[in-house]
Image (cartoon, grey):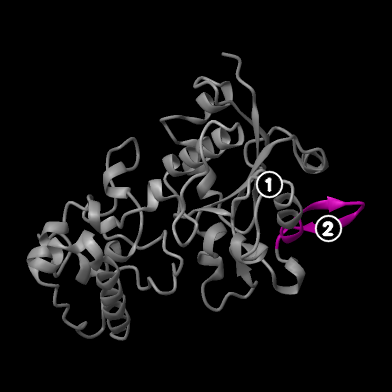
Amino acid sequence: METEETSVVWIQGQGCSGCSISFLLGEHPDILELVTGEFPPIKVKVHYHPTIMTEWGDTAFKKLEKLPEPFVLVIEGSIPTKDNGTYCLVGEKNGDPVTFLEVVKELANKASAVVAVGTCATFGGIPAGKPNPTGAKGVSEVLGKEYKSLLGLPVVNVPGCPPHPDWVSGTLVHLILAVKGILPLPQLDEYQRPLEFFGKSVHENCPLAGFFTEGTFAKKFGEEGCTLLLGCKGPVTRGDCPARKWNGKVNACTISGSVCIGCTDPEFPDAMSPLIYYPAKPIPEFIPPSTMAILLYGYGLKGELEKRIKEWMKLARGSY
């Protein structure tokens, strides 16, 4: 089968390039399989990516003036909006500096689909944390609620600090096949995240969930029990981390004995801080729901349980 290329234009703003690094370390498929078309009819042409492209300076930036059609726009990093976006300059045009804010708005109107990769791009992330001196925002907030790509999609959000490489490659492959008319558009949740990866909470796949049901909570790291009292945000965070696992399917935060820090949540990092609980005074007691309520967890009580835990988290933050 002859494979037709679909181009990806990947731009980077206010971030650490960790999302790119995570994506490049993906395995099934890896970046080489995607760009060589090893899985027909999927073949990706990386038209622009400032971290991995061979061109640099003006030569690289001019590639954004000759965009291939169709293309999927990937945005990594938050977008500074204060002072007209002057805190993130990505090139020059006719001798004048060009802001990341300008590039995002211009390219988004030409893209078949727009994917915000990483929590900085999706919700503002760490750069948008208080006091947010640069006015950093996520892509959806910058483009507005009414934005639709040429495929009729809103911004597709793939959060994570960084996101799992499967979340990025899986979303890109789905969108590329949608561009070709092979697959329907991906289903998204209320925060425009693909349900395929963000349909369940971290807690639902966590191997320690049984301890939560029993009301057995660890008081220190290494102790047997659910780590909620140590700062785990798994019950209020969406992502399939414990089931999918990281680093070649080896491990995940809650499997390794650490806590979920809530990095895919729209309120990360402010509402998720402190990431680990070492309070100056005792934190409020958390009384788990009844066993019957836990058994019904997936049948309508999920939202109520998440709300209850978020209220408790606010009380816990008051202990610092």
**Quadrant assignment, res 213:** bottom left
Disc 1 element: loop
| Image depth: mark 1 or mark 2 in front | 1
Q: Earlier in the sequence, mark 1 or mark 2?
A: 2
Which residue sits at x=51%, y=65%? 126
Q: Residue at x 65, y 72 (%)?
A: 134
| Picture quarter with the N terminus | top right
Residue 93, x across and y down, in percent: 87, 51
Look at 49% across and 45% down and name the residue there: 186
The quarter holding residue 49 reads top right
Closest to the observer: 244 or 270? Answer: 244
Q: Position of residue 260 (x, y in %)?
A: 30, 60
Give the answer, above or below, for where 5 lies relative to 171: above
Query: Residue extending furthest right?
Result: 94
Using residue 191 as the reference point, say whether residue 204 is left or right of it: left
Name the dominant secondary structure of the magenta segment: strand
In this figure, which residue is indicated by the disc labeled 2? Answer: 97
Of 76 and 290, which appears nearest the observer? 290
Q: Nearer the viewer, residue 30 or 59?
A: 30
Quadrant showing the C terminus: bottom left
* Stretch in magenta: 88-102
| Secondary structure type for disc 2 | strand
Instruction: Specify the farthest residue to the top.
Output: 1
Count of picture labels: 2
Residue placed under numbered mark 1 in the picture: 150
x then y, percent, for residue 266: 46, 66
Asked if residue 305 shows in the view, the reply is: yes
Identity of the amino acid at label 2?
Answer: Pro
**Residue type at numbered disc 1:** Leu
Work out how far the residue at label 1 is from the one at label 2, CA to CA, in angstroms.
Answer: 28 Å
Near mark 1 (Cα within 10 A), the count class, few <14, some 14-19 or many ≥20, is some
Q: Residue at x 64, y 23 (%)?
A: 4
